[in-house]
Amino acid sequence: MAAGPQPPSLQLPRQIPNLTASRTGDQVRLHWTAPRENTDRLKLQKIVQLRICRRQQQTAAWDTVATVSAAPGKAAQYTDVLPAQLITGPLRPLRYSIFGINKHGRTAGPSNIVMVLAGPVPTQVQNLSLQVVERGVLLHWQAVPNLPSGTSVEIERTLVPHPRASAKPATSAKPNTAGNLNLLSRADEPVEQTLRVSLSAAGSQNEEAEENDPGIALDSSAQFGQKYSYTVRRVIERPADNRTLSVSGTPSASVEIETRDTFPPSTPVGLAAIPVSASMNRGVPEVDLSWSANTEPDLAQYRVYRQDVTLHTPVQQIGLANHFESIVAPAFRDLHVQPGHTYAYTISAVDTTGNESPRSQSIAVTVPAS
């Protein structure tokens, strides 16, 4: 038996489940995917009409901000420029939702509800400057006292490609004695990274407390041999409805920097020398040197310097075989010594960029005459 006639479709777009929102300055950016089907599970053939709404109180009526169009199933976005009354006063939740409507203005219901903070934005970061230091990139900006509680500083770092970049892998800034930094190859480093500097005391719940911005931060994950662009902005976070809402200030002007490595390794320590007579070494006298290994991740080699104290010769660099091979282990055997002569030795460390450390403390040793 043939099915009975069906009522015509109302062509109501299905509800949107993936609305997101973020606020920077006086703008709220909304992102979502437009409905692909109507409530009858039929594919929408025409452009979808959407009503963008907001409200302050959870129980208040929705105010229509705008009506926009979007292609079915496609990503869409809208930027809401807040009026003056929503960027002043106390920080408070501001809710958004989107209603898909048919040609008669009817809707199947709201999207998921998202929230941002209404109220004043943090002050813009001014006078950003950058400095390459041994442990990374040091950022300076104009400090601001008496910031609202929950304020933090957000640092956006972008990797800038440039044709003069070295072909060899980049290394992280040299670690201090507190611990090693995470090493990333140039290919593994993300193009964009966000770093956060908290100004609030851990666990503080006092919304009336004020914070002081120190105006300085260290990006210890920056790598040498790169070019970066930095922007900094202040962010305020507040708990609301079992979630954390935030409002971001306008980003600072961007500043670029090339992280050239001009910092030598640490001076080698623990140098020791043991002379060996010719009679104990198959007729060849020698001096065996050893020292504590350097721990820099970009260490390339060591250099050994010697002075013949007996003959008052100048200090000269010595090496393996042809004097040009690299010394990579913290040890060296000097086979070019004379019995009865006294020699003074010092050691330096060299990194992959060619930066050489100061020489170690000198040690003198006399080769046995027999």
Image (tube, rainbow, N blue to C red):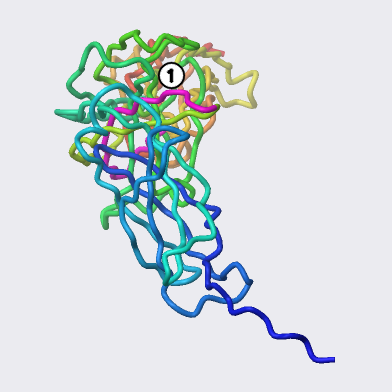
Q: Is residue 324 above or below residue 78?
A: above
Q: In which quadrant will I find the C terminus?
A: top right
Q: Is residue 331 above or below residue 365?
A: below
Compare residues 188 and 4 and report the one nearer the observer: 4
Compare residues 157 and 330 and report the one nearer the observer: 157
Compare residues 57 and 346 and report the one nearer the observer: 57
Q: Mostly what secondary structure, the magenta segment?
A: strand
Instruction: Identify the residue at horizontal 51%, vertical 13% (top origin).
Output: 273
Q: Is residue 38 left or right of residue 66?
A: right
x and y percent of residue 325 in the render? Answer: 45, 41
x and y percent of residue 224 in the render? Answer: 35, 38
Query: What is the count of numbered marks?
Result: 1
- Check disc 1: other Cα within 10 Å, few if <14, some if 14-19, many if 20+: few
Residue 87, magenta (yes or no): no
Q: Is residue 212 above or below residue 288?
A: above
x and y percent of residue 67 in the render? Answer: 33, 60
Residue range of the region highlighted in magenta in the rendering: 221-241
Instruction: Identify the residue at horizontal 44%, vertical 63% (top origin).
Output: 75
Q: Residue furthest bottom?
A: 1
Circle 1 sits on which residue? 176
Q: Is residue 366 left or right of residue 276?
A: left
Instruction: Identify the residue at horizontal 53%, vertical 11% (top origin).
Output: 368
* Residue 132 shows in this picture: yes
Q: Is residue 329 above or below residue 366?
A: below
x and y percent of residue 73 in the render? Answer: 50, 69
Q: Residue furthest left?
A: 127
Element marked by disc 1: loop
Q: Residue furthest right?
A: 1
Q: What type is the residue that disc 1 sits on?
A: Asn
Instruction: Identify the residue at horizontal 41%, vertical 44% (top origin).
Output: 96
Q: In which quadrant will I find the N terminus?
A: bottom right
Residue 227, magenta (yes or no): yes
